[in-house]
Amino acid sequence: MKRIAPWIEAMRLRTLPVSVAGVVLAIGYARHFGCAELLPAMLCLAFAILAQIASNFANEYYDFRAGLDKAGREGPRRGVTEGDITPRAMLAATFITLGAACAVGCSLLLFGPWWLLPAGIAIALGVLAYSTGPYPLSRHGLGEVAVMLFFGIVPVNLTFYIMNGAFNHEVLLGSLSAGFMGANVLLVNNYRDVDDDRSVGKHTLTVMIGRRATWTLYLTSGILAVLLMAGIWATLPPATWAIPAIYLLLHLRLCYMLCTRTGRRLNPLLGLTAIAMAAYCVAFACVA
């Protein structure tokens, strides 16, 4: 169990609901438009989860190699930095997991056109580009943009397309909504780590704009996430409008927690932000 625990920590289970949420939201839209299919939906879900785990492994390895992590950091324990996992093992796990994601992604060619292959390759490269390469996105204030793209716009639209065979403007708005909610998870992470990141020269968005602006962005993103889906909610029975209302109330509570806590006390908020996103998307999928 002691050998497994560092790997479970490295998967960052608190954040995995983000990858689940985008696919589930797409399933909700597919149900609404009468085109939901179980098998491709489950394959999209498996691909999204594996890709996120690979991204988390890559982030831990490449941040360690660049000297951006240090022992005793405010966030969750980093296995490579603390010596629980060897760098070689983490690098191998990154590419094994990414390879598994690519294998699942190739199976989706059975349900869609040829251009899904280059799209999948772009996603795989994005997994690595977040943490490494000539211009690592996470170190240049672009982490939140990457999350919006790869955990919102891409999974929601592509999952829906695979089931429906066409894109839809309402789904596009929903993908932006998922992107904003997902970006909020990273905002919490960077808000918590701002002092550690600043000390090692890691230029996250929070390091660049400060805590106050980050809190404002977190608040605004949650509100925009609900407003972007106002059109689809308007087509559903009024009783279902309680779902976005409850999300907004919870979001305001989480905003208060963000501005009144620091350091390790923000760790629960990271998971709560991800769970709130997933719960919202699951609820939508159930009533759509």
Image: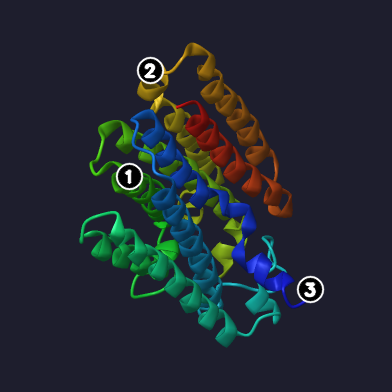
Using the rendered image of the protein, determine whether residue 90 is visible from the camera's viewpoint: yes
Residue on which the image places disc 1: 163
Q: Quadrant of residue 269?
A: top right
Q: Position of residue 8 (x, y in %)?
A: 67, 67
Q: Is residue 224 left or right of residue 61?
A: left
Measured in 3D between alpha carbons, the distance from the residue under mark 2 to the one under mark 1, in whole angstroms, is 21 Å
Q: Furthest-left residue in view?
A: 114
As drawn, the label of residue 70 is: none
Farthest right residue in view: 2
Residue 146 at x, y = what percent? Answer: 39, 55
Q: Quadrant of residue 82?
A: bottom right
Residue most extreme to the top: 238
Q: Secondary structure at mark 1?
A: helix
Q: Which residue is mark 3?
A: 1
Q: Nearer the viewer, residue 251 or 111?
A: 111
**Element carrying mark 2:** loop
